[in-house]
Image: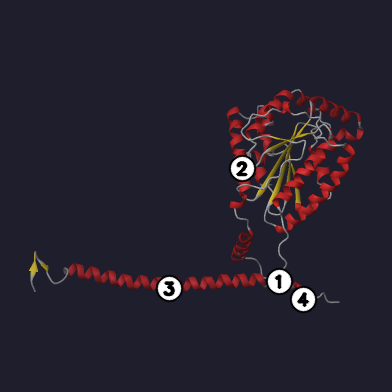
Amino acid sequence: MSKTNGKDADGPEPGKIRETASQGDAGHRTKGKQAEKKAKGGARGGAKQEARTRRADGHPPSSAAWARAADAGMGTAPSLSPHRHPRLARAAPGIVTVEPGIRFALASVDADATGGLDKAEAKAALADERERIKALQEKLYAEHARSLLVVFQAIDTGGKDGTIRSVLEGVNPQGCRVWSFKVPSAEELDQDFLWRYHARAPGRGLIGVFNRSHYEDVLVVRVKGLVPEETWRERYGLINDFERLLTLSGTTILKFFLHISKDEQKERLEARLEDPDKHWKFDPADLTERKSWDAYRTAFDDALSRCSTPYAPWHVVPANRKWARNLMVARTIADTLEAMDPRFPPAREGLAGLKVPD
């Protein structure tokens, strides 16, 4: 056997032989462990299948059952890509839609405008729009794939409650949720400002209504000086991102600003004072808020200008005439639902041959 520099020319050094042998032993052990792990994995897979079967047979839920439910839910979840450009209908005649990227001023909108509507005809047409909303909501609920969020903002006495009550009359409450956002609770104040609104965004198949909304956090907090200016100014972009997230998740957003004049607000406040049945709606703080009319108008102008986007534009509704306001809003909601084109899911197979027993 020849040697070169003290090494065997025909093979590796003895030390290398021992190292290679050791690695080979380790390789055999590793393969054995992998086989054992695979066997255990198969057992766990069988256990998961058994858990699913037990759940189907009425046994208590388990993590495996939860996983199956999650899988089933994902199977019906809408694809994100179709909702990058939500199906938005043109607003009803009389409504002014704020063009994205353009500076807007409420002073440019006549709060007395009716869109050329006749009062008697408008009241009759409202009944038709309610029927459209009811029929389309049923399909949206049954389809269980997308949702509609309707946002209402207005200055005090602007008519948010009355509009919601009138427009959504007869809608199945199982498929509709109305949320009125008052002063935040201690728990809500401990979270980010969008937390309470996101928690109440409508799920699939639902119409969600915000009576006041996330815009309060760039309106009242600004006028009252509840947060620093740099804080509320940053929120415009965060609100746009929030609404973009909802849109990408399958929620179509309709935002209505109910626009009344200062004189109209005065008449409505006086009417509440004169009618004992309306005293419960009157808050002396409303008189204090009225003194900040100009400050609120400026805040509204900024919010409408900065947060009217292609996927969630603002619609300014002339609201001095309640009958015109109600029809404009109802028609826009109905047209939007129609543009979304919700559909009943396909019938289950085998129904044609079924008979109901006596």
Q: Is residue 254 above or below residue 135?
A: above
User: Which numbered mark, 2 or 1, is in the foreground of this view?
Assistant: 1
Helix, strand or loop for disc 2: helix
Residue 36: assigned label: 3
- Of the numbered discs 2 and 3, the one sitting upstream in the chain is 3
Residue at image position (71%, 49%) is 339
Q: Give me the C-alpha separation between circle 2 and circle 3.
A: 48 Å
User: Which numbered mark, 2 or 4, is in the foreground of this view?
Assistant: 4
Q: Nearer the viewer, residue 130 or 7?
A: 130
Question: Mark 3 belongs to which amino acid?
Answer: Glu
Q: Give me the C-alpha separation between circle 2 and circle 1.
A: 40 Å
Q: Nearer the viewer, residue 8 or 143?
A: 143
Q: Residue furthest front?
A: 116
Q: Give me the C-alpha separation between circle 4 and circle 3.
A: 51 Å
Helix, strand or loop for disc 3: helix
Query: Do the CB atoms of the residues marked 1 and 3 lie less than 8 Å apart?
Result: no
> In the rendered image, which residue does mark 2 sit on?
242
Q: Give me the C-alpha separation between circle 1 and circle 4.
A: 10 Å
x, y (%) of residue 94? Answer: 77, 35
User: Which numbered mark, 2 or 3, is in the foreground of this view?
Assistant: 2
Residue at image position (91%, 33%) is 276
Residue 353: assigned label: 4
